[in-house]
Amino acid sequence: QSATTPWWGRTQDGDGRVDARWTKVDALGGAVVSRAPVPPSSVICGAPVTAEGGRMVVEEYGNRRLSQFDASGVLRWQSGDTSTPLSSSTPAVISVAANGDSTYAVGDRLRRVNASGGVMFDVATGVTGVKYLAVNASGDTWLVANDSGTAATVSRFSPSGNQLWSTTASAACIWETTAALLTATDELLFAGFACNEARVVRIAADGRLLWQRLVSGAEPRSRVRLSALSVDGAGNAYVAGCAEAGFLTYFSPNAWTVAASWSASGAERWSAAADVA
């Protein structure tokens, strides 16, 4: 919170190291931060904070039920689904609509529950390793998935859970999705890391791959990872991230900040790098 003393805290036992999965600042200036164990563990966090500062949690074991807690950490409801997802090392991803409907992907399952936890649909996606999920105002769902493979799969589902289309973007090396953004026109922009380069892909609302672009570094900071995406009113795409020689550590913290922009059609507008070491 704004002061140094927390209002409350909750701990879930788990093995492995812990990472901050999300943070949220409310209207009063208080901050809610989650730290979750890396799978395997008993609980996967990383889901959105509810409007009033509560949280959503997906259990990893059993049938991976979705639970909602209020701002005091008290359980409100738990949704018991009947199907068990295929295992995946990727934590669950969740989107919560203004009406309280929660759409989440875990393993190979895509599920939606209402504000009380009632299951609205529960379908197989055909993919595991979902890294990004977005829902538009009409209730359509987009998934970006990659699970230690050389491709990223983008899928769109209807409000009732029917798959509308699926598109794949491939690379010659292991692909790691690092950021994604659903635009106001239902185009999906996402970034990945493969072969030490950053890749930016734009997918049309009907599933067509509009364009794919590379962002490469220069020695000695040749590895480029993008972590932020945005579009303006004209549809121009903007990306930002860092270029480094390897994994950043206390003893090797040097990195460049990199940024680039393309037009809606994929023409490069500009690129820049700044040494912030």
Image (cartoon, rainbow, N blue to C red):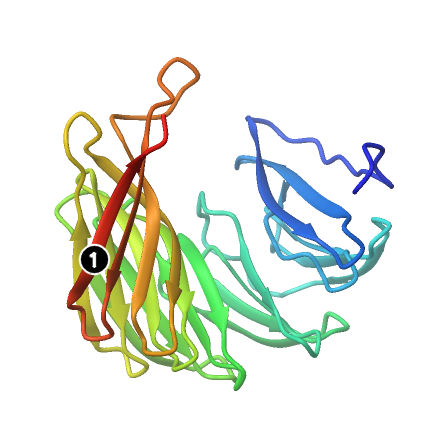
Residue type at mark 1: give it.
Answer: Trp
Which image quarter is the N terminus in?
Answer: top right
Residue 128 in view: no
Instruction: Give residue 143's quadrant in the image.
Output: bottom left
In depth, the one of 221 and 17 nearer the eye is 221
Which image quarter is the C terminus in?
Answer: top left
Q: Residue at x 23, y 71 (%)?
A: 263
Query: Looking at the image, which residue sits at the far top?
Result: 251
Q: Residue at x 32, y 76 (%)?
A: 235
In the displayed structure, 183 sits above or below 108; it is below
Callout 1: helix, strand or loop? strand
Q: Residue at x 18, y 38 (%)?
A: 217
Instruction: Give residue 113's quadrant in the image.
Output: bottom right
Q: Is 91 positioned to the left or the right of 245 in the image?
A: right
Residue 203, image x and y in percent? 27, 72
Q: Residue at x 63, y 57 (%)?
A: 48
Q: Is 64 positioned to the left or the right of 138 in the image?
A: right
Q: Is 110 positioned to the left or the right of 31 in the image?
A: left
Residue 69, image x and y in percent? 79, 55
Residue labelled with disc 1: 270
Assess disc 1: are there few (<14), some (14-19) or many (≥20) residues with their C-alpha within 10 Å of its C-alpha. few
Residue 105, image x and y in percent? 51, 61
Residue 46 in view: yes
Residue 49, image x and y in percent? 68, 56
In depth, the one of 224 and 133 nearer the eye is 224
